[in-house]
Amino acid sequence: MKPFAYLNPTSEKEAIGTLGTEHGTVAPLAGGQDLLARMKDYLAQPDRVVNVKNALDTTITSTPDGGMKIGAAMRIVDLAEHAEVAQRYPAVALAAVEVGTPQIRNQGTVGGNINQRPRCWYFRNEEFVCLKKGGSVCFSVSGENQFNAILGGGPSFIVHPSSLAVPFVAYNATFRLAGPKGERMVRAGDYFTLPSKNLQTENVLAPNELLTHVILPAPGAAKTGHYEVRYKASHDWPIAFATVVMSMNGDTISSARVVMGAVAPIPWRAEAAEAALVGKKITEETAAAAADAALKGARPMSRNAYKVQVARTAVKRAILRAGGLATV
Amino acid sequence: MADVKQQQAPQGGRGQQPQPPPADPKYHWPASRALIGTPARRLDGPDKVTGRARYTYDITRPGMLYGRIVRSPYPHARIVSIDLSAAQRAPGVKAAIAWREPADAKRNVVMYQGDEVAAIAADTEEHAVDAARLVKVQYEQMPHLTLVEQAMSPDAPAVFETGNVRQGQAQEAGDLAAGFQQAAHVVEQTYGTHVITHVCLETHGAVCEWEGDRLTAWVSTQGISAAREGFARGLNIPEANVRVITQYMGGGFGSKMAPDAQGLICARLAREAKAPVKLMLDRKEEHLATGNRPSAAARVKAGVAADGTLTAFDAESWGTGGAGAAAGFPLPYIYQFPNRRRTHKDVYINTGQQRPMRAPGHPQGSFITEVLMEELADRVKMDPIEFRIKNLPPEGPNAMWRAYLRRGAAAFGWDKRHATGDPAPGPIKTGIGVAINTWGGGGRGSQAHCDISSDGVVVVKIGTQDLGTGTRTMIAVVAGETFGLPPSAIRPEIGDTMFPISGASGGSTTAAGVCPAVRIATVNALDALKERVAPALGVEPAALLASNGRLHVKDDPSKAMSWAEACKQLGTQPISVDGQWQPGLSSVTTSGVQFADVSVDVETGIVKVKRVLAVQDCGLIVSRLTAESQVYGGIIGSLNFALYEDRVLDRNTGQMVNPNMEWYLLAGMSDVPQIDVILVDQPERGVIGIGEPPTVSTAAAIANAVRNAIGVTVRSLPLTPQKILETLAQQPQRS
Amino acid sequence: MEALTSPKITVGHHCLRLRTKSMYVAAVVDPDEATFYDRYEASAYWCGHTQAGFGPDGHPVRPDVCCGGRDCCRL
C-alpha cells in the first residue's frame, strides 16, 4: 500500500478543508469496506486519507415536513434495524439488510454504500486497465460480461453497486452535498452519472465535496415494493433488483416510480414502466406489462441476456409485493 | 497421434477383493467396542475454536521475515529482463531473488498467469508486498491459449512443444455396433463440467528456518514426509537435514502434496537473508498457481434396450488440466455398458496446472454419466432408481448401491417424486434427484509409536498429519479402545517428521493407514504394561484385560488396579514400543448414494438446494462425528461445484477475472441445505477412508433434481441462473 | 515404511525426478475397480527438482515426456 497521511477531522467544515481538488489524491474514509480493499489492491493510491466518521452525522432524524434525514456516516446495520425506517420506507430497510454480510453492515456506512466504486471484475483487477481506469476499452464488451450492464449504453458497462441508492431514487430522496462554498442539494435521481457523461467517477460529487445526508421526503400513503434477485442467499451481489413506489387513488395507481439496480451504471429509473402503471389497478397483468416496459430498451451483450429476464422478474415481483399480491 | 485400439476386459464378473493374510488375532478390532463407532467429540475442537491451535499461518519465529513472490501477469510470455535494484533499496527489504533467468532460453518463459518470476523477503508483510511491486520485469508477450475450443482448433498457435492436444488411446470393450442394434432408444448429447480451484481456507505456504545446513519448515501440507522429500530434492540436501512440522492445517483437498515453488523460494530467501522467512500465498495466488480441478466434456451416444438394459456407450471426451497437465476422468461411471468405446483428449491451455482435487476425476465422470442415465431412464419410462438398479455391477461389500438406493429412497421420500417437469403452477418448481459414488482408497505402511509413563500419560506418536479431518480424534479413539480409556486420556502427537513415518493424506488413505498402526502399537504397549503389572496382581499377563479405566483379571474382575495405579508400577522405566501397519485391519472401496431436493425459480433461474441425504459406508466406523463431518464437507463442496464455483478467465487476455472469494462464489451458511447422513457400518471390513466419496455425487444429484423440477436438461455445470434461463429459453418445457 | 513408488512410473524408463501423488500416498488398489470404470489418467505430475509442473527446461512434466530426450532428464 502506498504510504499516506491520515487525518481525523471532527467537524464537517474541517473535513471539507482537508479535501483536494483532484479525484483520487484525497480519499474520504468511512467504513472502509471499499476504500481499504482498493488501497490494498493498489487500485486507489491516495496521498491523504480523511476519516470522516467523526466529522459526519451518524444519526437519523425526522424532518419538519414529515420526512427523514439520514446522516451519511450512519452504519448500514443501524439503518436496517431502524423501526421507523422499516415502517415508513420499507424498501430502504429491505435494501439495507441485503447489503454484504453482517460484518460489512456493521462497518459500512450509508454514504459509503452510495459512493463505493464499481464492483466490475475488470475494474477490480489491476491487470485490466479499463475505461474507468483511464484505459481505452471496456473489457466486458468482448469479454466476460455476465454481470455487466444491460442498460445505459456504455461506453463502460459497469453496474452501479449501491443497494441503497435504488430505493433512495425511488423515494425521490435528496442528497445534501457540502463543499468549500457551502452546501448544495441534489436529487438522488440526478446524483448518479452515466459513463457517457463521466467516465472517471459515478456521480456528480466533486473531489472537494462530501455527501453528508440523505433526505427522504414524507412517504405519504405510497405503496412500496422491493425485490432483489441474487444467486446466493449469503454474501453476494444482486443480479438485478427493483424498488417500486406507487401513489394510489383508491385502487388506481396515480403515480409510480420504478427503479432498477444492478442493470446499468446508475440506479435505472424505468419511466416507461411508470407510465404503464399509471391509471391501472395493481394486477398480475399490470405488473407483467410494466416489467416488460421497464426492460424494453435493454441491450444485452454476449452473456448477459438472462439479466433482462431476471430484471423483468424483479420489477414484476416488486409491483406485486407493493400490491400485496406476491406469491413468491 | 493415431488412435491405438486397445481391448479391455468386459465389465461385470465380480472379483474377490484382495484379502491379505490377517494380522495376529490379538490386533483385530474387538467384537464389542466401547469407543470405536461412537460420536466422540473432536479432541482439538476447543483448541481450534479458541485460536490456541497454531496453523502454519500462525507461526512466528524470532527475527522472522516475510516473503512475497512476483508473478507473471500474462498467460504466456518471455521474460526479457528482471531488475531487482529498486526493490532491494525499498524499506525493510532483506533479500531479493530472481526465480528466472532472462538470458537462459530454458528459464525465461512463463506459461501461465501467476507463474513465479522473482521474490522478496522484508521485515514486514506490507514491506514485502510493496517491494515486490518495485521489481521491474520486462515481458515479451507470446501467443496464449485460454479457451479449450480455441486450443483444439487446428488454427490455434502451437504453444506447447508436444502439441496443444494430447490424444489418448481408444478404449473399447464388447461389440459397439451390436450394442446399438440392441438399443430401442439412443441418446446423443454433449455434457461438461468446468474448472474450479481448491480454495483452501488456509492458503499454501511455509515458514523456513535454517540452522547451518539443516532446515526446519513449518508447511501447510497434507504430507509432511512428502514435503520433506520435496525440500530435500529441490534444495539438493539430504532428507535427514529437513524437518517438516504441520500441527494444524486449513484444508488441502489434494493440492498440498509438495513444498511447491513457493516452498523452495521461501527456503532460498531464508538462506539469503540469514533469517527465518514466512511465505504464505494470498487468495489470488492461490486461485492462479496452486492447482485446480480439470474441466471435463464428453460427446456421448448411448443406447438402451426397451427393457431398460444399457446396451452401448460411445464417447469422445476431453478436458483441460491447464498448461500441459492431464484431464482424465472415469467414463462411464459405475453403470454397466457391456459394449463401449471411449477416446479422450487432454487439451492444454495457458493456466496453472491441475492438481488432485478431492476424488480426482470422479465428480466429472459422475455428472456426465448420471445426467445421461436420467435421460435414458426417461426414454424407457422407468423410475430412475429402478433403472439404475437394473444396470449396476454385481453387489458385494464394495458395491452396495442397490441396497443403499432402496434404503435412501425410503428415507428420502422418493415415492413422492413427480415425473420429469414439476406440474405445479407458478414459477417455483421443485424436484428430486439421485446419484451414486465409489472410491477406492486403502492405506498401508504407517508406523506408530506408543509411550506410557508412570504418571499414566499415554502418548501416541505418528508422522501423519491432520488435513482437517480429525486425525487426532481418530487416533485417540483407537488407542482409547485398546486401553479402556476415554479419548481425552490419550495424547496423540502428529504433524512432525521426527515421528514414525506415515503416508501423505490423500486418496482417502489416512484412516486405513493410521488406525491399524495405532491399534498395533497400542496393543503392543498394553501387552508390555500387562507384563509389568501382572506380578503385582499375582496372575499371568495374558489373564489381564483393560477396560473402564482399569486393568483387571479376566475371570475375577475384583482383582484389579486403576489405570493410574497400574502405571505407577512402571517407576522410572516407561513403556516405549512401536507398531507397524499390517493387513487385515483395513480395506478398500466404499459405496454411497446421494439424494437431493431442490427448488428452481424458472423466472430468475435461481436454484435452491433444500435437502441432501447421503447413504455412505466406509468400512468400520471409527469416529462417527468426524466421519459424518467428512460427509457434510463433501456435500457442501460438491454443492459449490454444482451451483457456484467457477474459475472465470477473460477469453481475450487469458487472465482470471475472479481470483478472490467475492466473485468466485462459495456457499455461505444460508446456502447450505439440510444434510442428513446415514452412515453404514461394515465392521467386518475394517477401516476405510471417507474423505473423497461423499463429494463425488452431490453435483449430479442436484443436476438431476433440477431436471426433475424444470423438465429440461442442463448438461453442463455450474447450474447458474444464466444457464438455467438460457436452457429454458432454448428448449420447450415438458410438462 | 516400504519404499513408495507409483505404478505409473518405471525406474530406468522415467526420469528419477518425476513426481506424482501416488508416490507419497499409500493407496491399495481394489481389482474390482475395473468393474466400475475403465482406466483413466487424472494424475498431476511435477518435477522433484523444480517442485513445479514444469521441468528445469521450462516444459511441462508428464510421464510421456519425462523419459529421456530432455537435457534435464535423470534416468
Image: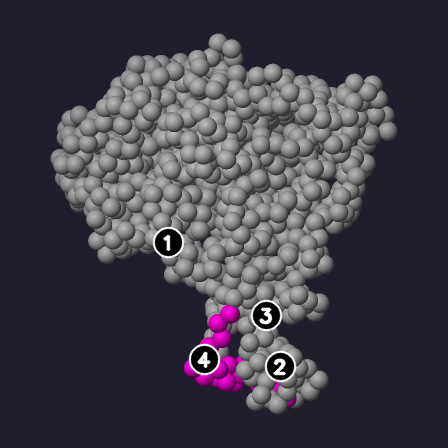
Residue A54 part of the magenta segment: no
Q: What segment carries the magenta color? A: B559-577
CA separation, marks 4 and 2?
18 Å
Foreground mark, 4 or 1, reads 1
- Which residue is identified by label 4? B573
Would you say A101 lies left or right of B486 here?
A: left
Element type at mark 2? helix
Give, as a three-letter code, the residue at label 3. Val
Q: Residue at x 68, y 21 (%)?
A: B5
Whichever of callouts 2 and 3 sits on the residue coming sooner in the sequence is 3
Q: Residue at x 54, y 36 (%)?
A: C10
In the image, residue B710 above or below residue C19: above
CA separation, marks 2 and 3?
13 Å
CA separation, marks 3 and 1?
30 Å
Whichever of callouts 4 and 3 sits on the residue coming sooner in the sequence is 3
Q: Name the residue nearer the viewer: A35 or A274.
A: A35
Give, as a three-letter code, the residue at label 4. Gln
Element type at mark 1? helix
- Which residue is identified by label 1? B240
Q: Do the residues labelled 3 and 1 touch (CB within 8 Å)?
A: no
Residue B558: percent from left, percent from top = 65, 88
- Which residue is identified by label 2? B541
CA separation, marks 4 and 3?
18 Å
- Which residue is identified by label 3? B523
Mark 2 belongs to chain: B
Label 1 CA crowd tier, 10 Å (few <14, some 14–19, many 20+): few
Give, as a three-letter code, the residue at label 2. Pro
Q: Residue at x 26, y 43 (%)?
A: B269
